[in-house]
Image (spheres, rainbow, N blue to C red):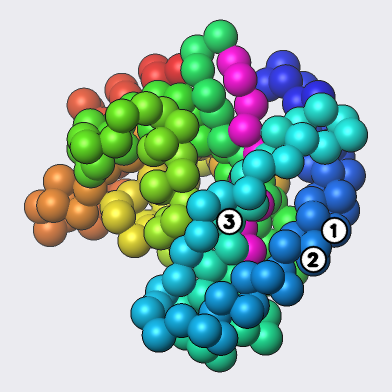
Amino acid sequence: MIVLTMTATEILSELDDDLKEMLRVCDGKDRAFRRLVLKTSRFPLYVNPIYHTTRRRNRWALFLMARSRRDAGESLAVFVCLVDTPCGLHALMPTFTDGIREVNIYTSHFFRRYRERFAPHLASGAAAIEYYFRENYNYAYTFREPGEGITEVFGSGHDGVAMGLRSVAGGINLFKTFVTYPMLKGRQIDVFGAADEHRRELHEAE
């Protein structure tokens, strides 16, 4: 079972092992989803996330989506591992950039800010997680190095910008807060992240 006291190497290893199982789960669900894609005339098509607990006792949410009927041959699948912590529910999403596997970790504070700043109609952190990953499953990344070996990472998605820190060894991005595009007020993302109020939130949040 994943706990956040694990090292980056341990987390990545456990996720790799779980992903093999989750890919089999996805294969089992994908045929029925493809039938929905071929029948519908409304896109994008989303279904409720499929929850599965792996043999390592990690709870995952599988999101299946299609942007057009062409996706019937290969639907979009997003895998998110949910981890309960004393601070609330965290989410871990494996990603692949240029064939290299990395992991984005989103804290409960991140989802509180997402609800406050973008989706106040959502009733809970769990609802925010489902809503967030339906639209924000890929990013354009920006990095900033303010010094002292720190790398800040900004992920621009559909709804706004995820702000966090990158692990020293690489491979893990810890996203701690969220801002909407109107909050940027025309400023570049890295300049906005350097502002005192947002820098404090980025470095001091759980």
Relative depth, front residue between 163 and 136: 136
Image x and y of residue 151, in percent: 51, 40
Outermost residue, left side? 185
Image x and y of residue 25, in percent: 79, 55
Crowdedness near tag 2: few (<14), some (14–19) or many (≥20) residues, C-alpha within 10 Å: few
| 67 versus 164 height, above or below | below
Contact, mark 2 vs mark 3 (Cβ under 8 Å): no
Marks 1 and 2, how far apart at CA: 5 Å
Residue at the disc numbered 3 = 63
Residue at the disc numbered 1 = 24
- What residue lies at 73% left-to-right and 41% top-to-bottom? 52
Q: Does residue 80 show up magenta in the picture?
A: yes
Q: Secondary structure at mark 2?
A: helix
Q: Which residues are magenta?
A: 77-85
The answer to whether 170 appears left or right of 46 in the picture is right
Between discs 3 and 1, the one toward the N terminus: 1
Image x and y of residue 50, in percent: 63, 49
Crowdedness near tag 3: few (<14), some (14–19) or many (≥20) residues, C-alpha within 10 Å: many
Crowdedness near tag 1: few (<14), some (14–19) or many (≥20) residues, C-alpha within 10 Å: few
Q: Secondary structure at mark 1?
A: helix
Residue at the disc numbered 2 = 27
The answer to whether 40 appears left or right of 100 in the picture is left
Identify residue type, mark 3.
Phe
- What residue lies at 63% left-to-right and 64% top-to-bottom? 77
Identify residue type, mark 2.
Asp
